[in-house]
Image (cartoon, rainbow, N blue to C red):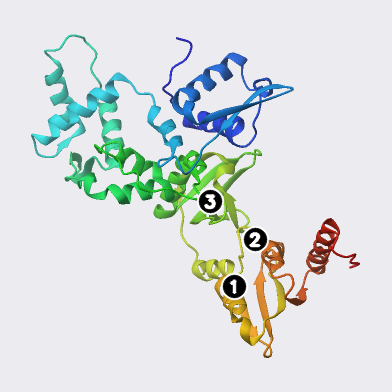
Amino acid sequence: MAYSELIKDFGRIRSYLRSFYVYGFQHRDDFTRKSARSYDNERRRIESWLGGYLAFRQDENGRRMFFSVDSRQVPRNPLYRAFKTKSFTGWDIALHFYFLEILKRSEPLSAAAITDRLSEMLAGLPGDEEPDESTVRKKLKEYAGLGLVVQKKRGRETVYELAGGSPNPENWREALAFFSEVLPLGVIGSFIQDRLEEPCDVFRFKHHYILNALDSEVIFWILRAIREKRLISFVTTDGHEIEVLPFKLYVGTQTGRQYVLAETRKRGRLFFQRADFIEKIAVGDFYQESPDLEQRLEYFQERSWGVTGSNTEQPERIEMIIEAGPAEYFVVQRLLREKRSGKVEQIDDCHWRFSAEVWDPMELLPWLRSFIGRITDIRCTRDWVVTRFYRDFADLSRMYGVRRYDF
């Protein structure tokens, strides 16, 4: 067999999936990192998981593969399958059952005592190989991190016991189905759903952001670092290596993209980092929060219209005056509903002012354009933002042949 469907390094598969099936639509000849045979092996592996969701188009350079998914027909994210093909060793499987058998029949035991019990159980079986205490200790530590066993101190000794019982997933069928497809780390819900006799397929999503599944491992380490107040270091897709203090995870309602709000350790700059632009990530040391952290975060977030800009710049003021008569209060209601951190003030019976202080006023332009026809004035402390607004309007007018505007 030329390849195995199981994998050890998900980061490599994530890179293949994004480069060839999601963003780049690259061709086999564009692959330069290893041999063409390596590309063929990875392609066949991916097709074995996702064969029903792949399509291709033919151009002058050959065949290009890409994802093709109809959200009306797909109740569960197919990309989670990539996480369920992790390779393992023989001891990974065997130790799981041996640990359960040893710990369920005794009081809390140390790693040394569990190793001794394990040797007794293996004594009558063929084969001379036995896991040493170091292997047992590492596996117990892994299980403690997964919540399968509880690690605690008994005097100077570290002992382990089985964790308490788990709830019946059958009682959470609908919640698991929704969580798996909507929330970050939905892959966890997908794993639990695999234990159900009949998974719940009642949900369909108009906007189904399935590509977030590829970032699940990155998101896990980010959320863990946020909870434990630890530094993270990561390498971006353009090769930059950054060490930051992570604070919060954001998910875009329009694009489904995931961002982490973080502060650079060296420069103390708050910024947003897209999760799908992170190639490698590692959790570092614990950090001590600065006394003014909450105030700085609040100040930064209040002036963030979207996910660009940084606090090394001064916020810019932008304002727009629109016309809405007494019988058109629905326009004002929309302003109030969508103003985010901005303010809405009434000037007179027919005019209303929207104003906001933001790090990047360019982020507001698509939203401001949706009020064209009612805007009577627009201003910004960055003159080129206003120039850009009127230039785009002039281009649009010429495109549709409405009238010639000179701004």
Mark 2 neighbour class, 10 Å CA radius: few under 14, some 14 to 19, many 20 or more: some
Report which residue position mark 3 lands on.
256
Kindly identify the amino acid type of the residue bearing the numbered disc 3. Gly
How far apart are the alpha carbons under marks 3 and 2?
22 Å
Q: Secondary structure at mark 3?
A: loop
Left or right: 174 in relation to 383? left
In the foreground, 122 or 71: 71
In the foreground, 29 or 166: 29
Left or right: 123 in relation to 259? left
Kindly identify the amino acid type of the residue bearing the numbered disc 1. Lys
Upstream in sequence: badge 1 or badge 2: 2
Q: Reply above or below: 262 against 364.
A: above
Mark 3 neighbour class, 10 Å CA radius: few under 14, some 14 to 19, many 20 or more: some
Q: Nearer the viewer, mark 3 or mark 2?
A: 3
Report which residue position mark 1 lands on.
339
Q: Secondary structure at mark 1?
A: loop
Mark 1 neighbour class, 10 Å CA radius: few under 14, some 14 to 19, many 20 or more: some
Q: Which residue is at 56% across, 66% downward?
A: 301
Please tell me in which quadrant of the rendered image residue 80 appears: top left
Kindly identify the amino acid type of the residue bearing the numbered disc 2. Ser
The reply to whether residue 271 is visible in this rendering is yes
Q: Which residue is at 67% across, 77% downward?
A: 355
How far apart are the alpha carbons under marks 1 and 2?
20 Å
Report which residue position mark 2 lands on.
310
Residue contact at pointers 3 and 1, CB within 8 angstroms: no
Please tell me in which quadrant of the rendered image residue 148 appears: top left
Q: Which residue is at 13% across, 30% downward?
A: 102
How far apart are the alpha carbons under marks 3 and 1?
20 Å
Q: Position of residue 29 (x, y in %)?
A: 68, 20
Q: Secondary structure at mark 2?
A: loop
In the foreground, 186 or 352: 352
